[in-house]
Image (cartoon, helix red, strand yellow):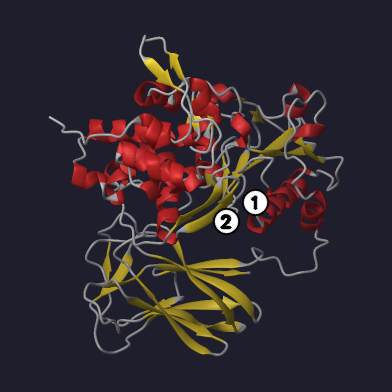
Amino acid sequence: MTVRRPTRRVSQLLGGAMILTIGLTGQPAQAAPQPSAETLAAAFDRAAVRSDVPRDLLAALGYAETRLDGHHGEPSASGGYGIMHLTSNPKVRTLDEAVSRARLDRTALRTSDAANVAGAAAVLRSYADQAGLSEAQRDDVNQWYGLIARYGGSSDKATARLYADAVYELLGTGFQAATAAGQVTVAPRPVAPQRGEYANVAPLGSADMGTQSTDYGPAAWVAASTSNYTASSRESAYPINYVVIHTMQGSYAGSISWFQNPAAGASAHYLLRSSDGAVTQMVRDKDIAWHAGNWTYNTQSIGIEHEGYVDNASWYTDAMYRASATLTRFLCDKYGIPKSRNNIIGHNQVPGATHTDPGPNWNWTRYMELVTGGDTTPPPTSWSTIVDNSTSGRFTASANWATSTYSAQRYGADYRYANPVSSSDVAWYKVNIPATATYRVEAWYPGVAGYNTSTPYVVATSSGNQTVNVNQSTNGGGWRSLGTFTLTAGDANKVGVSRWSGSTGYVIADAIRVTRV
């Protein structure tokens, strides 16, 4: 039997004046507080107390979904509302669950930030109760991973992991968000999410995923539901004359999940992530995605969706602009599409369009400069390379470094490990740097409890070696930034992993990525 903590009065927890209406069940359905001086941070605090859900977990979930922007109660493309993206569509019904669990009015859940947060917290708490989480487990953010994945609504495990990983990465790095209702802050912390059934699921875009796009090499491949596009044989059946630029009105992981949903009735060929410009293809170039709202344009175009919302310019990052422009330039060259605004168009320019994306915040001048090559600055993403521990001629380590396949979070087939000692014994990654410039250096390692909490990464910069210590017992299975450094042109050992650590546990050398910025 679950013993529940006494809860405060709902009117106290949500703040402001309350309106009561009668729901379909005959029970009072509580509407949102009327506008008051309560900050959004306070709304997260109150919802966390009421539902016994970690406050920072709630805030990170909201930030991952919407950057804490409720968009004035307007729905996302997948029918999600508010800063917590409470959703009502044939596959995901978190809004309907919130009505039942939080006993809050449906309209209020869609339009009031405080009610929206409270509703999401109530839904998560119901998931925790169903999973049998104890009070002590509920206090540990690492125990909620599977429940966060469930909240995202994807039945595809790789997509569900992508969704949950985004939330836990925000918990690990922390963030500050300025909103109309005040600033929300989440401090950085070590995280070691208990992934459970998702532990052995390869993240999208990782080497183990094994499903890269055959049309565009840098893209991961995740198939849209066959109910959401038309199989074809372009270019023999139809010419490809246009690239249509879209904004998702939603998150990257959420949009991937939506296009996998047979009820969506929509799709796009490519989707891009805001934070780093990652690309996922969901419909083959030869097939007809349903994205333009005009059959003729659907048959003759490639649709590219960009993470974010049209009324929030912060989603349109330089990394996403550059990655998208690189993709568009590739498509134009491949299919002979003129690199002009007559052929590279917004969704709003399609005849008969009812959509406004990519909206007024999309910088067309900058984008077309990148597409046509008119930009004279070195593109940050124009050069990037990955060196794995198994890359021929690019990795050297002494015999003290053994090989393991133990963790499914590894990059590629295996990784190297060694005991810490009071001597360097560096495992080196050799990188051919094209020009002396600033580069971002990232590491991939399996995060396993018991691995070293202070592994020294050595970066050979133009001004000498710099050491960055990394906790390899957590935050594994993805790229983790070591920082930006000035690297000298030439082919030499540029990044290493040293055994000289004051902590216990294996030090790990798996893979590194170097990107010009």
Position of residue 390 measured from the top left corner of the image (x, y, whole percent): 39, 68
The amino acid marked with disc number 2 is Asp
Q: Is 219 in front, or is 31?
A: 31
The residue sitting at 74% across, 22% down in the picture is 295
Q: Quadrant of the N terminus?
A: top left
Of labels 2 and 1, earlier in sequence is 2
Relative height, residue 515 to residue 319 (above, below): below
**Residue marked by disc 1:** 314
Question: Is residue 191 rendered to the left or right of residue 255?
Answer: left
Q: Quadrant of residue 104?
A: top left
Question: Callout 1, which amino acid?
Answer: Ser
Q: Is residue 40 above or below residue 425?
A: above
- Farthest residue toward the left? 1
For disc 2, the marked residue is 276
Q: Is residue 14 visible?
A: yes
Percent of width and height locating residue 328 = 72, 48
Tell me what residue is drawn at x 24 percent, y 32 percent.
129
The foreground one among 265 and 310 is 310
| Image side of residue 234 versus residue 130, left or right | right
Toward the viewer: 149 or 420? 149
Residue at 68% x, 48% y is: 313
* Quarter of the figure that contains the C terminus: bottom right
Q: How many marks are shown on the rendered structure?
A: 2
Picture layout, residue 484 above or below residue 166: below
Inter-mark Cα distance, 2 to 1: 13 Å
Q: Position of residue 297 (x, y in %)?
A: 77, 28
